[in-house]
Amino acid sequence: MPTGGYQLVTRGVERDGQHAYRPGHPLAEFLIHRAAGRKLDPAAVVFNYGAHPTKLSVVEALRGHRGYLSLTRVSIESLEREDHLVFAAVDDSGTALDQETCDKLFLVDGEISGTTSVPLQIGEQLAESCEAAKAVVLVAVADRNHHFFDQEIEKLERWAEDLKEGLEQELKELDAEIKGLKKQAKLQLDLEAKLALHRQAKEREAERSRKRRALYDAQDEIESKKESLISDVEAKLQQRITAEELFAIRWEVR
């Protein structure tokens, strides 16, 4: 990685000689990987809302409150892997905090004030909250998969219908043209002209046969794509779900 100064790409005007720093940069990837691999023991964290520059109503309502919070990474593996971060939190009165409140809480500067441990009963409550939040994630993933499946099937059906209508219209036009050529040939007295018309009719009949085969081939291709889509969705249903607690804290908002 190049040495020198780095500048976040969100900072606006670029400075001369500064390297652009973004999540995909090798240095950023290295630091993220190292941070994600750290083992974090439970800690007491004080969030200083009084110094926060903007209003966060859900966090402001927590000023003077304390409680416990855990963050769990839920990984879902099927055809691809996706990770979801799930909060579980309660205050000392036993009231649960929702995901949005936990998210907003971590927008506020915090400072570690010491080590701590999570009482067994609180740990069980956090685990129950985590399972409930995980269930919400799984429902959302299932709904998204259903929506994706319905959309893809609908696209295939529309494609099949448009293709069928287009080819059937071309076949009708060819049928009419063949019928007209044969009628003209029947009325034609000149043998050479009659043969020429029959030759044209024969060529149109060959073209009609090709169009019919193209229609059958297209229908086979669509059925193949449907089968592939169904197989993909079936594979997604064979999910492997893992959960890993990333950290737990004793929180306080001032």
Image (tube, rainbow, N blue to C red):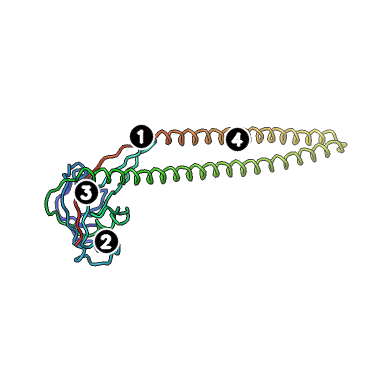
Coordinates of residue 221 in the picture (x, y in percent): 56, 34
Q: Residues within 10 Å of mark 2 (few under 14, many from 20)?
A: many
Q: Residue at x 42, y 36 (%)?
A: 236
To which quarter of the image does residue 74 belong? top left
Q: Earlier in the sequence, mark 2 or mark 3?
A: 3
Does residue 116 sit above or below 101 in this rendering? above
Report the amino acid beneath label 3: Ala
- From the image, state whether disc 1 or disc 2 is nearer to you: 2
Q: Earlier in the sequence, mark 3 or mark 1?
A: 3
Q: Secondary structure at mark 3?
A: helix
Q: Secondary structure at mark 4?
A: helix
**Pointer 3: what residue?**
28
In depth, the one of 234 and 218 nearer the eye is 234
Q: Are the residues flagged by discs 3 and 1 in contact, CB closer than 8 Å?
A: no
**Pointer 1: what residue?**
240
Q: Earlier in the sequence, mark 1 or mark 2?
A: 2
Report the amino acid beneath label 4: Gln
Q: Earlier in the sequence, mark 1 or mark 4?
A: 4
**Pointer 2: what residue?**
59
Q: Are the residues flagged by discs 1 and 2 in contact, CB closer than 8 Å?
A: no
Q: Earlier in the sequence, mark 2 or mark 4?
A: 2
Q: Secondary structure at mark 1?
A: strand
**Pointer 4: what residue?**
219
Coordinates of residue 253 in the picture (x, y in percent): 20, 60
Mark carried by residue 91: none
| Left or right, 140 with reference to 54 | right
Q: Residue at x 58, y 32 (%)?
A: 220
What is the C-alpha distance between the residues marked 1 and 2? 35 Å
In depth, the one of 156 and 54 nearer the eye is 54
What is the C-alpha distance between the residues marked 3 and 1? 29 Å
